[in-house]
Image (spheres, helix red, strand yellow):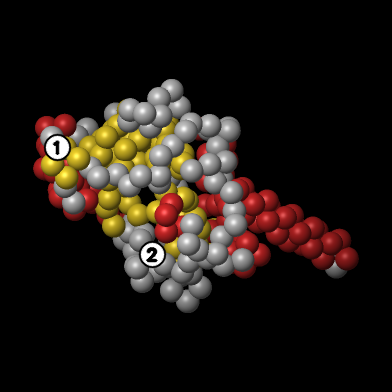
Amino acid sequence: MPSTTLDLQDNAIGGDKKTEAETVESVIQAAPDQGIWVFGYGSLIWKPPIHYESKVVGYIKNYVRRFWQHSEDHRGTPEKPGRVVTLIPYDEWKTMEDVHGHDDVTWGVGFKIPSDDVEATRAYLDHREKNGYTVHTVDIFSADNDKEPAVKNALVYIATTDNVAYVGPASMEHISQQVFETYGPSGWNAEYLLNLAQALREICPDARDDHLFELERRVKALVDKSSSSSTTTTTTT
């Protein structure tokens, strides 16, 4: 797997350090001429933006993917929320009670949105990610080069740990049961998890994300158990 550095990005441009908000704004201002890149690490991997002209499989540094965000609008409801992924800064994650392995990078897909489609795509993604997510920037690296980014300053939607729908760590048993049991307007929460795990294997067979794959194993076991129970009930009635 690629080597990484855990130093925080400073988004230095022309020698001047910009705040993240300023970097996001500069990317958006340049969009009419250059388009934008969007990095997907969750459902965007297997359900991409409607309009994009190219894509690159790659990874970002300094973040960990976790099912620590409630979903009340897509994979759950306000009465019974589901769980979806967000990105936790690596240094912040290290201070939390979580023992699951990670290879220090998060794999996903970058999508190039042409300039003519930027406004519509941002409106679409803002709605899709409205339940606690805000826009940030990341550099995307390819498997061939872990020093120079393949894409600089891609936009990414992250539900930070201070948003109202953030729920944080829980036992794997609790998370898998919650994912298995919840449904929302976009469908079964388990479908989201299983599709993500399969998509990650397809784009990077060597990716290490023990959190995701352990949840996948547990949810599949719950699905099998439920199917077996249904078969038994049908046979005996």
Few, some or many C-alpha atoms within 10 Å of disc 1 (few <14, some 14-19, many ≥20)?
few
Q: Which residue is the site of mark 2? A: 161
- Residue 71 at what x, y percent from top left? 44, 64
- Label 2 crowd (10 A; few <14 / some 14-19 / many >=20): some
Instruction: Look at mark 1 in the image and give the residue it sits on.
Output: 15
Viewer-nearest residue: 134 or 44? 134
Quadrant where the C terminus sits is bottom right
Q: Amino acid at mark 1?
A: Gly
Q: Is residue 35 left or right of 56 when viewed as pictured?
A: left
Q: Relative to residue 214, is residue 145 drawn left or right?
A: left
| SS at mark 1 in the image | loop
| Observer able to see residue 190 | yes
Q: Residue furthest top?
A: 144
In this view, 154 is above or below 87: above
Percent x, y for residue 48? 39, 40
Q: Is residue 67 left or right of residue 156?
A: right
Residue 152, located in which quarter of the rendered image? top left
Could you tell me the amino acid type at mark 2? Thr
CA gap, disc 2 to disc 1?
30 Å
The answer to which image quadrant residue 142 occupies is top left
- Residue 44 seen from this side: no
Q: Earlier in the sequence, mark 2 or mark 1?
A: 1
Left or right: 55 as drawn, with respect to 200: left
